[in-house]
Amino acid sequence: MVEGEVWHGGDLATAKALFPEAPEPWIDLSTGINPIPYPVPALPLSLWQRLPGKADEAALLAAARKAYRVPDAAGLVAAPGTQILIELLPRLAEGPVAVLGPTYAEHALAWRKAGAPVREIAGLEEIGDAKTVVLVNPNNPDGLLIERVRLATLAHELAAKGGLLVIDEAFIDFTPQASLIPELPPATLVLRSFGKTYGLAGLRLGFAIGELRLTEALRAALGPWAVAGPALHVGALALADSGWLAETAQARTRDAARLDALLVPHGRIVGGTALYRLLATPAAPALFAHLGCNGLYVRRFQNDASWLRFGLPGDESAWQRLAAALASFVPVPGGVA
């Protein structure tokens, strides 16, 4: 890892460099991406040959508006992933900025790169003089979920001083009742990620929902043809498939419970969502290395060496390899929380 670089999951090149003798195929459990993706149909060749059309974008936005229960008066903009939206957020508001953490590190980094004063806070009571507050709900990596009433109150408080509340709901699809979008308060911008829930991270698709002045500013910053034609097409199909989402939510919830059962003997499960679980144990560095030597890559953390985040295995073979590797792990004395 390069010094100062933010660690992310999903980079198997790093895993192979760390553990060159590990058996293949590698099992990547380092992301919170659904390992069983939405079934993408055959795509018309024309989607690759022409620029994305306005009708295609309108179809995607209509499907997203219904799926996310966006109020009629609210704005909605699509982007090539939520990461680019995070990078653009400093154009919408001023500092000081408070980021509720520990959380997805790119949020604080984006504001710092823009020159804004940033404080990473452990609780909302520490907001102080911040005009912009950023939080992930449910939080990544611990799954902390803040109630809608508390968020709405905070939004009104920030609106009164000309501020902004940014809520990243990247992992909320399986608990839609927790989303603030249907009752969107003022001075609030909500980010939604498509690729994690639908297992299609490579499609690069994300959304921002908020007041029209905010979403139109983002749309202008993104420029024309921001989202690729295939992403518009697949996103519209998947977001309209409520049956698939409901069935997948139940299946991944069962998978998360199965993962818990494997992890409990090895430490304390801090929390998570239906797509990942966070384990705390003093033996985390040794467990990370043991799993890596067995061809399983999990997510470690710069800010807490006792944490490991586990994504879900994608098939029975992967489940069995994970179970066998965990069963064969022997920590040093006192190495289990």
Image (spheres, grey):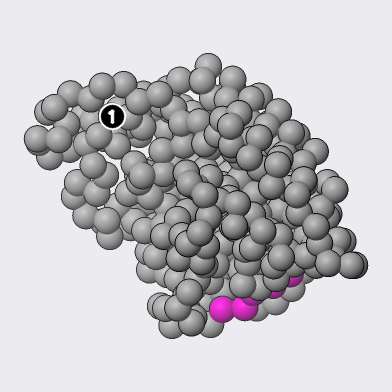
Can residue 40 be seen by looking at this rendering? yes
**Residue 57 pos. (x, y %):** 26, 35
**Viewer-nearest residue: 145 or 257:** 257
Q: Which residue is mark 1?
A: 233
In the rendered image, the residue lying farthest to the top is: 243
How would you classify the magenta stretch by its main secondary structure? strand
Instruction: Check if residue 119 falls in the magenta segment.
Output: yes
Q: Residue at x 58, y 25 (%)?
A: 248
Q: Is residue 204 above or below residue 1?
A: above
Residue 332 found in image quarter:
bottom right
**Residue 212 pos. (x, y %):** 39, 49
Q: Is residue 300 above or below residue 275?
A: below
In the rendered image, the residue lying farthest to the right is: 334
Q: Residue at x 32, y 29 (%)?
A: 234
Label 1, secondary structure: give it.
helix
Residue 83 found in image quarter:
bottom left
Q: Residue at x 87, y 61 (%)?
A: 337
Residue bounds of the magenta highlight:
118-122
Instruction: Check if residue 235 falls in the magenta segment.
Output: no
Q: Is residue 104 above or below residue 198?
A: below
* Left or right: 262 as drawn, with respect to 106: right
What amino acid type should be assigned to the residue bearing mark 1? His
| Count of numbered circles on the image | 1
**Residue 319 pos. (x, y %):** 64, 35
Can residue 140 be seen by looking at this rendering? no
* Left or right: 188 as drawn, with respect to 77: right
**Residue 5 pos. (x, y %):** 47, 75
